[in-house]
Amino acid sequence: MRPLQISPETAQKLAAKLGVPLEHLMHMPQHILLQKLAELAKSDSAQPDASADKPEEGQS
């Protein structure tokens, strides 16, 4: 199994977002990474940003 073919910047961002060490991310099987990304996207969509729902105050 070869390491994921992603840029170092992308790997760092994904590792931070998923909460896994960079070394684990780079050697993670692709299907597991895709599953984790799907779970992350689902949890992000389930928790909408509260500030987007508030009307802007102080504007006339």
Image (cartoon, rainbow, N blue to C red):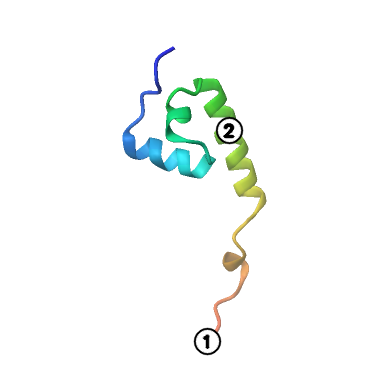
**Residue at coordinates 62% horizontally, 37% vertically from top-left?**
39
Q: What element carries label 2?
A: helix
Distance between the alpha carbons at the discs numbered 2 and 1: 41 Å
Task: Mark 2: give few (<14), some (14-19) or many (20+) Cα within 10 Å.
Answer: few
Q: Which amino acid does the dot numbered 1 rest on?
A: Gly
Q: Which residue lies furthest to the top in this view?
A: 1
Position of 6 with respect to 27 (left or right) is: left
Q: In which quarter of the image is the N terminus?
A: top left
Left or right: 49 in relation to 29: right
Q: Residue at x 59, y 28 (%)?
A: 35
Q: Which of 21/32 is in front?
A: 21
Residue type for callout 2: Lys
Instruction: Kindly identify which numbered label has been placed on residue 36.
Output: 2
Label for residue 48? Answer: none
Q: Residue furthest right?
A: 46
Q: Label 1: how many residues lie within 10 Å, few (<14), some (14-19) or many (20+)?
A: few
Q: Position of residue 25 (x, y in %)?
A: 46, 30
Residue at position x 52%, y 86% from top?
Answer: 58
Q: Earlier in the sequence, mark 2 or mark 1?
A: 2
The residue tagged 1 is: 58
Q: Which quadrant of the structure image shows residue 4?
A: top left
- Up-down relation of residue 54 to residue 47 (above or below): below
The answer to which of 54 and 20 lies nearer the viewer is: 20
Residue 38 in picture, x, y percent from top left: 59, 34
Secondary structure of the residue carrying tag 1 is loop
Measuring from the top left, give residue 36's x and y in whole percent.
58, 33
Q: Are marks 2 and 1 in contact (CB under 8 Å)?
A: no
Q: Quadrant of residue 3?
A: top left
Q: Nearer the viewer, residue 38 or 5?
A: 5
Which circle, 2 or 1, is nearer the viewer? 2
At a point 37% along the width and 38% down the height, the residue shown is 10
